[in-house]
Amino acid sequence: MKLHYDASTEAFRTELRAWLEANQPTLEEIRADPMTSSAHMTEWARRWQRLLFDEGLLVPGWPPELGGRNLPPVQQLVYHEEIAKIPVERTSNPQGLGIIAPSIHDYGSDFLKEKYLKPTLRGDITWCLGMSEPGAGSDLAALSTRAEVHDDHFVVSGQKIWTSGAHHADYCFCFVRTDPDAPKHKGISVVIIDMKASGVTVRPLPEMNDREHVDFNEVFFDGVVVPRDHLVGPLNQGWSISAGSLAHERGMMWLRSAAKLDITLDGLLELARQPGPDGRRVGENEGFRDAVARAYLDTQAIWFMGYRGFAKFARGEISPEHSVLKLFGSEVAQRATLAATEALGVEALDVDFDGYGFDETFGLPPWMTQYFYSYRITISAGTSEIQRNIIAQRVLGLPRR
Amino acid sequence: MDFEVTPEQQELIDSVESVLARECPTALVRDIVESGASPEQPWKSAHELGWTAIDLPDDLGGLGLGFTTLGLVVEQHGRSIAPGPFLASVTQFLPLVCEAGSPGQLERFAVPAGAGEVRGALAIDHGRAARHELGESLRARRDGDAWVLEGERSYVLDGDVADEVAVAARVDEGDGVGLFVVSRGAAEARRAVAVDASRPLAHLRFGAVRVEADRVLGTPGQCAGALGRALERATVAAALECVGACQTLLDMTVEHARNRRQFDQPIGAFQAIQHKCADMFVQVEKARATAYFAMMALAEDDPRRSLAASMAKAAASDCQELVCRESIQIHGGMGYTWESDVQLFVKRAKTLEALFATGEAHRRRIAEVLGV
């Protein structure tokens, strides 16, 4: 147990920092052509992702032909630490790079790998992930989008919801029911759907914070024909792909949310220096001071828990930290942003902001907007209640009903 | 940041766990609480197996394994709420002597404490411990080469049973901190009727107690740094023992939830119970990870050490508050009884929360350090 890594790992960090410094897109470039959804590949974003790919710094644990350099786990961690510190993500299509590419890599046929893997990694194409449905949220296995199985194709009909970036995505990695008679976990398959195919309709679903800037969508499939060779993995084995897909990069995914919380915390410290609604410095407010101390402690604890989980992850053990970090991290963000809105009083009602909530290069959105956003993160990607169920049942071994 | 426990550390953890499981069952703690029995065997093992010398340098007869390894052992003590001199002697008395003592004093106090021949205690100002400060309740004045202590120190862990007590007192010069070692009996001791009877707390009254020069640690008026560093160690150790106790409470509660049946099913199948247990788990994980970070920060003398110590104590505080309350709640009526072991662990956790300042005080300290 020690605070610092060995000299060669730190040397890698220094070299990486210098490279990122020299090559990352400039803020001017980003603001001139902002990315407006999680599947919106702007020119600068594509150039950046390709550069990372060519340098072996896109998925550093993978071999060079897949945009990596076969880095050992500790250096991968250092990579993710440093990447989390710069204001731009590796990709403007995180679900494509983080979930779908690894799933195609692990489960796809040679044909699918050839056709989709490298273009995804190089930012040529973008993806949305078709999982949730109006009737299948927390109970994902209840999904009812049907894919009729024919000799050489499927016919897909149904509806997805909360589909991030669907209005910009080229393809959908879509979970569909291929055997309606099997028990619900056993009749699910994954198919790749061309979003330009006939019968696909996308309807934007703006979030409560901002009617103009949409990431979520509803996606309707009406008799969409999908070639048979676009089935990922074996027929009716989709459920294990869902578990596998979401497990990808879990060992590292927490880093960016921890880094975001660090930014929130810097915002709180800045707010402490400003005058509050009663004219006193916000930092003189006892309740606010305690909330900042808590937020700082909790944010640091997220880093520490993440690193502890990583030690297990690097050893190849399943670590419960992912659920803990997801559950705890979203609640920390909620408490921290609430404290700011309370300290600001009526000032918190002003939500004038000229930027995109999920793009850090525009600076922090108003605190009330951030607080509202925190309502999303206790729901999306597995609600807090589902995370508690997972901890209770899979970690603590309490009985399932 | 590498949180990986080394194979050597894991071996030690396993060995401490099995020795304490054998020699320090909860029945022993209950016996101490109910009949004032005194626990000889766990302490004997602790020094025979070298646990008392883990963080002592080689040249003082120690194992030189560092604070990180000691911390892991302290956590195990918390898991079985081990009674006895270990916590006060090894994590409170020894650090102060090692921070401030002269070579002769290290030979005289640290070496025998590391060998378990001397049991030590530490008398500081718990109410001001988060800021490493001392109030006015105990003062020391110069008297030739010697010093005279006048006043009192309260809630001194093992204060009436330890052989030697390291004392921090207010002095009129320099940074205001003087450090001394007095032997048992030098101060008038009164045992507090404390919530956890397996953790003896004493109030010490110093009526013009004369301390000869060879028992004065360092130079009075230039000891604030040493006191602060020793307090950081004691604080993190208290947090670790608290984490250990909370882990056992969680384990007991989950076990109970699996076995206790109501409405024809284990209560642990109810989501209301599952979610409470999950929240307890999160708090234990948070407190443990934070305490481990603090352990490393102290072991490596990292600039964040002071902040880390306060974070560890504040995280342990959050943890014990939830875990104590929900453990009793989930155990139901029986959890509230004397005969349930839950109360023994709850009382230990509450004691550790209060010693070396509460979480609330440490959060105030954190806000201060952050410049809020």
Image (cartoon, rainbow, N blue to C red):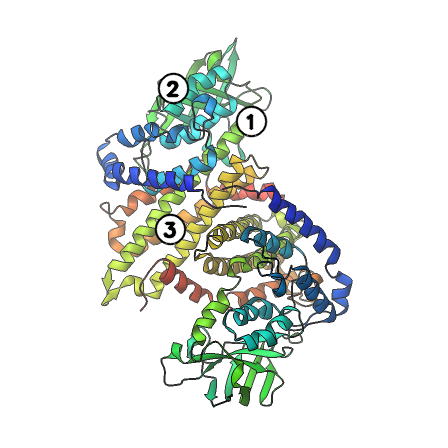
Q: Which residue is mark 3?
A: B323
Given residues A21 and B104, the one toward you in this image is A21
Q: CA distance from mark 2 to mark 1?
A: 23 Å
A367 left or right of B217 in image: right
Up-down: is B17 above or below A374?
Answer: above
The amino acid sitting under disc 1 is Ala
Q: Which residue is mark 1?
A: B224
What chain does mark 3 sit on? B
Q: Are marks 1 and 3 in contact (CB under 8 Å)?
A: no
The amino acid sitting under disc 3 is Val
Q: CA distance from mark 1 to mark 3?
A: 35 Å
The amino acid sitting under disc 2 is Ala
Q: Residues within 10 Å of mark 3 (few under 14, many from 20)?
A: many
Q: Earlier in the sequence, mark 2 or mark 3?
A: 2
B28 left or right of A219 in image: left
Q: Residues within 10 Å of mark 2 (few under 14, many from 20)?
A: many
Given residues A277 and A53, the one toward you in this image is A53
Q: Which residue is mark 2?
A: B187
Residue that appears at 70% across and 69% down: A46
Q: Earlier in the sequence, mark 1 or mark 3?
A: 1
User: Where in the figure is residue A188, as x and y percent of width and height?
Assistant: 43, 79
